[in-house]
Image (cartoon, grey):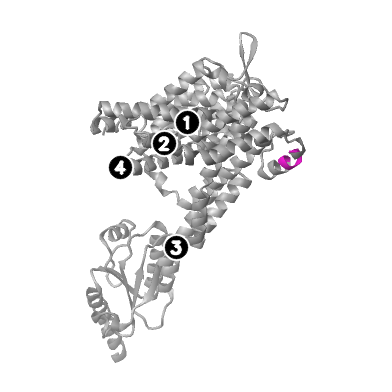
Amino acid sequence: MSLPLPPLFAAWRQTLRAGYSWRALRGDLGAGLTVGIIAIPLAMALAIAVGVPPQHGLYTVLVAGSLIALFGGSRFNVSGPTAAFVVILLPITQQFGVGGLLLCTLMAGLILIALGLMRAGRLIEFIPYPVTLGFTAGIGIVIATLQFKDLLGLSLAGQPSHYIEQLQGLWQALPSLQLGDSLVALASLAVLLIWPRWVPRVPGHLAALALGALLGLLLESLQIPVATIGERFSYNLEGVEYPGIPPFLPTFTWPWLLPGPDGQPLAISFELFRQLLAPAFAIAMLGAIESLLCAVVADGMTGSKHDPNGELIGQGLGNLLAPLFGGITATAAIARSAANVRAGAFSPLAAIIHSGVVLVAILFLAPLFSYLPMAALAALLLMVAWNMSEVRHVQHTLRIAPRSDVLVLLTCLTLTVLFDMVLAVGVGLLLAAGLFIKRMSDLTDTESLPRNFHQALHDLPEHVLVYAIRGPLFFGAAEKALSVLRRFTPGVKVVIVDISAVPLLDMTALAALDNVLRDYRAQGVGLVLSGPVPHVRLQLRRAGIQRVEGHLAYVRDLAQAREKALRWLTPKADEGSATEGG
């Protein structure tokens, strides 16, 4: 048997089937230019947020953005750095440095490719909405908190890893507030809030950054300091330090040759891979969730249908190769993908063009980026965090959702903020699964059927009991449902159990039923199972629970169950008469 080929170029195959035209090309060009302009400041801001120089965000868009569009499974997804990764990537950078972050991203890429090859794209549908909403809202809170340092120009002694310590550090640093940074932040936030209502066709963040840069220059001329990218970051060229970001393309470098937390190249070891494995899995799972959710949103906007496994492989290849050229973790971004669709995109070419816009910006506009104020970029990320937190959806869910779903949401949100997203998603999934099992077990019950329930039961002897089991018999419900059958009544000789409403059995139920049969056999009680659906009957046979005359029988309905019970009782009655006569 031949293995199925990997679903590469799925989005391009969809594009060709839809028919490509000059009109589609014009739409891709316009959308690519629009989204590329949007991506430039976001990529730099998100790279800074995860603790690496801003050019790494641009390299991510340049390499991962184009590779994912080329190999992925969604025609409209636009990939690059996203805010969702900040809470995972920042601790990795703090502990392992830039080299550790890129190596972890490479490992996550391999995991994503494996998920795609295993056809696991549909498994993402089993993550409950309260879990997703809870950790995304928690991520938004954490990102917003991290921005106050640059929003107010605060001088922190260090960057604590825990949320409570971060709040304490910000409070203690309030006396170091800088007037210039605060004014730039307020002006940028005002533009971000007001501009979309006035000029919706021009991205508001571009206007906010332009105004922030001009205001920063004005304040600098008035001897009011404002922190900028050029002051915070620099690059080395032939032994000379230059401010800002390098105006040239990244070069191929193995991640472990880049600086670790001590400024020295990483020491490759099994222990290092062991420590990075859990974060890599977290990155891969979050990347899969984000990219596939984004593809679903894009499908809803366009009426298209993405290939989830192809998208996972595309995301994996992008995250596998981007770190070799300085790129950090990438995934599809809902905001950029939605802007891509609204701007008229037709194919993955739009996302590739968006990467080309970043390429032009690196080569020709890098010196200008040095003048961007850190406070303006922080204001941009603050708005991203607000949009990501989905406050309205959280409020709506808290108001209308069942209490169990509210508990899951609040648990995921709290754990994401106070601890980390890996723990939040793990606990959230376990809690949601446990509550689901409880709900399903509540649907399964066993009840005694009265004689007037069915015509076949009207004149059955008193030493025949009739039960009905309704619902799935699995590990969460089997013991409760079958325990009723163990309550022996003196004189009972046959028990009829209607299982026509049992859709499935698991191994726990089969084992419990086998124990019931042993107890019945020891007591001389026969069991008639009425109406098992075909696959349940097959499961019983495979488990070795076979027919034994006088002890176990399978029948089609209650009428046949009545006949079988009376047939078993007749010889027993005859034997009883003979004994008395003797």
Q: Nearer the viewer, residue 171 or 502?
A: 171
Who comes first in sequence, dot 3 or dot 4? 4
* SS class, disc 4: loop
Can you tell which mark lies on residue 38? Answer: 1
* Quarter location, residue 468: bottom left
* Quarter location, residue 64: top left
Q: Nearer the viewer, residue 494 or 485?
A: 485
| Separation of marks 2 and 1 at Cα, in angstroms | 9 Å
| Separation of marks 2 and 3 at Cα, in angstroms | 40 Å
Q: Quadrant of the N terminus?
A: top left
| Magenta-drawn segment | 169-173
Question: Which residue in the protein does label 4 denote?
Answer: 303
Question: Which residue in the protein does label 3 denote?
Answer: 439
* SS class, disc 2: helix
Residue 62 percent across, percent down from the top left: 46, 23
Name the kind of residue labelled 4 in the image: Gly
| Separation of marks 3 and 4 at Cα, in angstroms | 34 Å
Q: Quadrant of the C terminus?
A: bottom left
Q: Are marks 2 and 1 in contact (CB under 8 Å)?
A: yes
| Separation of marks 1 and 4 at Cα, in angstroms | 24 Å
Residue 84 belongs to magenta span: no
Name the kind of residue labelled 1 in the image: Ile
Of helix, strand and loop, which mostly describes the magenta segment? helix
Residue 30 seen in the current view: yes
* SS class, disc 1: helix
Can you tell which mark lies on residue 339? Answer: 2
Name the kind of residue labelled 2 in the image: Ala
Q: Select label 2 or label 4 by which is in front.
A: 2
